[in-house]
Image (cartoon, rainbow, N blue to C red):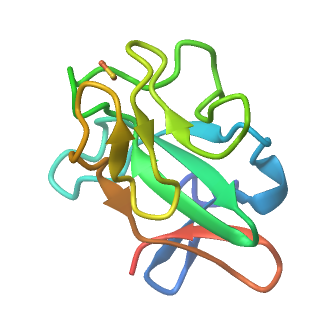
Amino acid sequence: MIDNDTNKPKMRGNRRVICHVSDISEAGKGLSLNNIIKDEPDRKLDLFLVTNGNDVHGYFNICPHQGVPLDLKPDTFLDVERNFIQCSTHSAKFQKHDGLCVSGPCTGSKLMKLPITVDSDGAVLLGS
Ligand code: FES
């Protein structure tokens, strides 16, 4: 989310507001954000969010198997039962809460987790 007055990312303290929890569909939400790397502010990085009960978890959108995005269809990061994060390329399955791959060609590998919290008003914040 961008502050319309300053054209910079909206911040709450040291954390960046990246969306509202209601923006996350039941299969997840993908985001492409710049201003993530301090020395490369224009570089966009792809990440995604999934819900797990009342919790929200975020990861870089990079499969540890071949380094490709997990979603072939936008905002579709979960399996049909909505129990696991699933890579669309070779169907690796990852636990939602820690990104550990529990089946598929990269079993035992992990997605790169992001520090995500949800504020009392439902704002999803990136940063620790
Ligand atoms: S690229 Fe994700 S499982 Fe192969």
On the rendering, which quadrant does ligand 1 occupy? top left
100 horizontally vs 122: left or right: left
Please say if 89 is above or below 104. Answer: above
Query: How many numbered circles are shown?
Result: 0
Q: Nearer the viewer, residue 56 or 13?
A: 56
Q: Residue 122: name its quadrant.
A: bottom right
Q: Residue at x 77, y 60 (%)?
A: 21
Residue 65: image location, x then y, percent: 22, 26
Q: Residue at x 39, y 28 (%)?
A: 92
Percent x, y for residue 44? 36, 35
In this rendering, the answer to whether 82 lies above or below 5 is: above
Single out the residue that lies furthest toward the left: 39
Residue at the far front in the pictured view: 103
**Does the rendering let one see residue 36?**
yes
95 left or right of 106 in image: right
Q: Is residue 111 above or below residue 93?
A: below
Q: Give the image location of residue 99, x and y in percent.
A: 39, 53
Q: Residue 17 lies in what quarter of the image? A: bottom right
In the image, residue 23 above or below residue 44: below
Position of residue 104 measured from the top left corner of the image (x, y, whole percent): 33, 27
The image quadrant where one finds the C terminus is bottom left
Front residue of 40/117: it is 117
- Residue at (71, 41) in percent of width and height: 82
User: In this view of the protein, can residue 9 be seen by the observer?
Assistant: no
